[in-house]
Amino acid sequence: MPASSFRVALLALFTVVGIAAGAGLPGASAQPETGDCELEPLTLPLFDATPAAQIAATPLALALDADTSDEAILAAVEDLVECINTGDAAYQYAIFTQRYLAEQFADPSVTNQPAFELQLSLGPADVEETFELVGVTDTTVNDGGLIAVTIELTGGGATYRDTLILANVDSVWLIDSIEELDPPQ
């Protein structure tokens, strides 16, 4: 099975969110099944109404004393996958640092923030396919407290293998960047 980019899959979610919001598709009205997702969902207004470009340009405030053991990083990635699988955009996108999310919206011609916010307001959707974590390898602690980790996920008949750059923000590991493996492995 060919390796695809997890980043492409996540950016496709941005596109789907934008299309669904633009079409006015209703979301489920029930509370989402958050499973083991322990992250706080995104809330509106996004970034507390601070312009995305300002958030994207703001350096991260990292917790430099965070547990960087292989076990802690594996548990963090497992938690992120749980949040993706909720079917609720407010939890699915809570896996990213605000800086990373803001980068996606800094250019409104690429990603439509108002459409994304509308989708967040609609609540959870039915989960048709979920991701399964296959493995976490090559954990590297970078200068400044960031962690590079290669993950492999399966979902929707595809395998995704990419390197995530994790940042510990407020005692939670979040994705601050996704680096596609070149060539894909």
Image (spheres, rainbow, N blue to C red):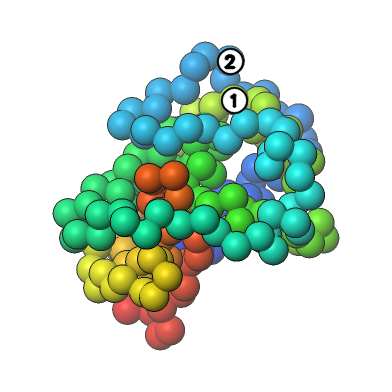
* Labelled pair 1, 2 in contact (Cβ < 8 Å): yes
* Category of crowding for the residue at label 1, using alpha-carbon neighbours closer than 10 angstroms: few (below 14), some (14–19), many (at least 20): some
Residue at the spot 62% in from the left edge and 31% down from the top edge: 43
Q: Position of residue 105 (x, y in %)?
A: 72, 55
Kindly indicate the quadrant of the structure image that contains residue 42.
Answer: top right
Residue at the far front in the pictured view? 65
Residue at the far top in the pictured view? 30
The alpha-carbon separation of the residues under discs 1 and 2 comes to 7 Å
* Category of crowding for the residue at label 2, using alpha-carbon neighbours closer than 10 angstroms: few (below 14), some (14–19), many (at least 20): few
Residue at the spot 31% in from the left edge and 31% down from the top edge: 36
Q: Secondary structure at mark 1?
A: loop
Q: Position of residue 173 (x, y in %)?
A: 38, 51
Residue at the spot 54% in from the left edge and 44% down from the top edge: 93
Residue at the disc numbered 2: 29
Kindly indicate the quadrant of the structure image that contains residue 162.
Answer: bottom left
Q: Is residue 64 above or below residue 112?
A: below
Q: Earlier in the sequence, mark 1 or mark 2?
A: 2
Numbered badge on residue 55: none
Kindly indicate the quadrant of the structure image that contains residue 160.
Answer: bottom left
Residue at the disc numbered 1: 123
> Which residue type does callout 2 highlight?
Ser
> Which residue type does callout 1 highlight?
Gly
Q: Position of residue 101 (x, y in %)?
A: 61, 53
| Along the viewing direction, whichever of 35 and 5 lies nearer the viewer | 35
Give the quarter of the figure containing the N terminus: bottom left
